[in-house]
Amino acid sequence: MLSFKLLRETKSVLINLLECQLRNTLSRAISTTPSHFKYRYLPTLNDPERDVEYSEPGYSHEDDGPLIQIPTRKQFREQVENIKNEFKVWKQEVKDGLESNYDIIVPRDQIHKIYSFSEEGTLEKWSTLCDANDGTGFSSCSLTRSPSGHALFSGNLSTKLPLDGRTVRSGFCSAIGPRAMKSFKRKTSYEWSQYTHVVLKVRGDGRQYLVNLSTEGIYDLNWFNLYSYPLYTRGGPYWQITKLPFSKFIFGNRGYIQDTQVPIPLCDIAWIGISLTDDIDGPFNLEIEYIGLEDVSSHTEEHAYETYNFDNYFYK
Amino acid sequence: MAWRFIRQLQLHACRPLLMSGGSGRFISTTPIVRITESQVKKDVAIKDKYFDQDIKNKETFLELLEVFKSKNYKTGHIEFIYAALNRMEDYGVEEDLECYKQIIDVMPKGKMMSTNMWLVEFEYFPKHQDCILDVISKMETKRIQPDREMFDLLVSIFGKGASPTKKYLRMMYWLPKLKHVSPWPAPQTRTKDQKEAAVLAVKRMGSVDLESDVTVFYTKDDNLSTEDTWIVSSQSPVQKNLVKYHPENLPMYIDGPHRMHLGRKNVVDYYVLKADMPENRRRRKFRDPDEISYMKIPFFDPPTSDDIIPEFSVHEQRDGIIYAISSMGSSSKECLQSWIRFLQKNGNPKLADATIVFRCGFQEAPSDQLKLPACENEILDENERRQ
């Protein structure tokens, strides 16, 4: 059984290795196209080949800034380095898998910090996204280190519409946590089904933020499934600890609340994020100390919203 | 030119389209392409004249709608409704539920009713439904909760199963559910004056300590001040005690102005009187009293003098001790000085000898005017070029 598991793991690693790493390396080594994709944030959004619709009405990607040209030899060396590091991660994974299944029991009523921003290396894994990134608005945001040593999600929200003839509403800023990944850039998901609450220690400016949990599946139909719940901030110089129960998270797709609400599949979380979409123009500041999970023993609710159906109400 | 023609087609079709553009492949990803601002201005140029009135208030607006209804036109309802929607801000009625109901009432009754499931599924009178959907969507963005009368109106126009009625039902499920979720309820309209907002904001900030005492001082009462404004200040007995034990060799700071939102319409700037943590209260690593992941076993690690520290009050935050919070009518140095004098009179005699450093901008631009990053200006230029 164990050997079978190991074999399967090795096979998937090798396939990924061949598919992603070597293909990228070779294609970059051979092709003549500029290799700036790796050095841009979220390459799929700014990819001129993919997003034809934004480049159509006079938008040129040349204005985005100078492209970084990297010598082929350097690229190749970097890729080899990457593969080495991935092997190290994989080795650790195999070791952990053989030792024990340590995630089964979690202590109750204790906050398990998953992202503690005062620690080194946590903030760098997070990224930001706003509507100006894909040309549908004029907001700007950043996630930096605050003077007191925590994460500071700040920027300027703008509901101004770009005159591109199709955008109707705009104004969103978001900070996105790292996607669950295994070695060799393989996608996995976080396993949080032992917990009941997500806990945040924040210091805000009185605005209403959103905590988002993505359950990004395999099919493109599910890519934009988000479970969200508002995070209200008190404002002022004092910190607040907010516990949001998973049972109350609202299911939406592309920002639209869905009619059929389902409990969040906690074994399949891809990433957690915080966003601001409250339609108020102006600057915002949210200081985050940590994001954690907790199993609250007094919480028994499974799902807060009605799940029954009408029998053909609309057609009668 | 060809692109513009395709775009026009797309706008008029109001349906998702699959078409190939200049670059080989182009797939419209938006589910429904709505009529844009520029397009509406072109279409409703005739109806827009209705709203060029001298007196712009709610009565005039409702009267204009009444005039249009009394004419019993057979067409032109959509254009008139879009014109009315765009002009609501001019008349100051964009947050008035009655006006939205009267706008929906412009649509003819009975004629567009979906009476069976086929009409529901294939969207009977789709452009009219989209138009009313835009009206309800605008209500949603303005956070206006519809009422039962609106439901009757929608049912009499489109029927029970049509998409505007469905949208109404969704709103009536979610809006009341999430209306009172916030633990800090705030006024959703603009307050009468800035002082009222400041009092609410300072109360909300001081709500961490139940003993917090919010008082309003008037600079008229201060002999040394030449200004005539108000100061809303919050300080609890615990904070007064902390000021009492403030070490004399360390300075205090006034930080600000910081910004705080109170509901959707009010913004309050506030100042904080604070100080750094004194050395004897500071730990090498600040730890939560409830945090048990760093717990020591006393047999192996006997407690040192650093470990025994009285429990922290809520005002002793990690980045300093907060002595008082205030919000004031003017952000001048003189006003801040009179705030300190008022605090001194009200139970903080120690402030007379303390060194207070002002870490705030007085004559700078208001905090809501952030300097925009360069990339935004580039996009703006891009838009101007497109026009």
Image (cartoon, coloured by chain):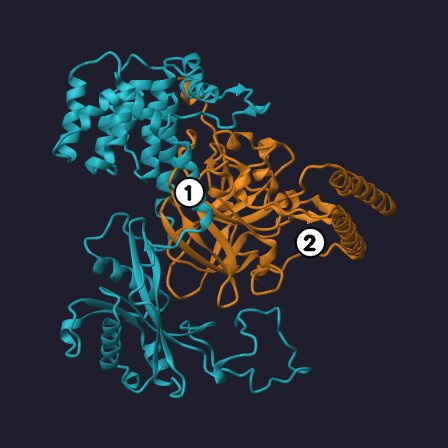
x%, y% of residue A277? 42, 45
Q: Nearer the viewer, residue B347 or A88?
A: A88
Q: Is residue A8 above or below residue B154?
A: below
Mark carried by residue B337: none
Question: Is residue B57 toward the left or the right of residue B290 in the image?
Answer: left
x%, y% of residue B221? 14, 75
Q: Nearer the viewer, residue A83 or B186?
A: A83
x%, y% of residue B374? 45, 49
Q: Is residue A208 above or below residue B317?
A: above
Question: Is residue A124 toward the left or the right of residue B279 in the image?
Answer: right
Q: Are marks 1 and 2 in contact (CB under 8 Å)?
A: no
Q: Residue at x 52, y 29 (%)?
A: A53
Q: Are callouts 1 and 2 both on one chain?
A: yes
Sooner in the amino-acid sequence: mark 1 or mark 2: 2
Residue type of the residue flagged with mark 1 = Gly
Task: Look at the image and give the colour of chain B.
Answer: cyan
Q: Chain of mark 1?
A: A
x%, y% of residue B180? 35, 48
Q: Which residue is mark 2?
A: A104
Q: Nearer the viewer, residue A74 or A267?
A: A74
Q: Quadrant of the N terminus of chain B?
A: top left
The chain letter of the orange chain reads: A
Question: Is residue A217 toward the left or the right of residue B82 in the image?
Answer: right
Q: Which residue is mark 1?
A: A171
Q: Is residue A249 visible?
A: no
For disc 1, the neighbor class at 10 Å (few under 14, some 14 to 19, many from 20) is many
Count of numbered labels shown in the rendering: 2
Q: Is residue A45 visible?
A: yes
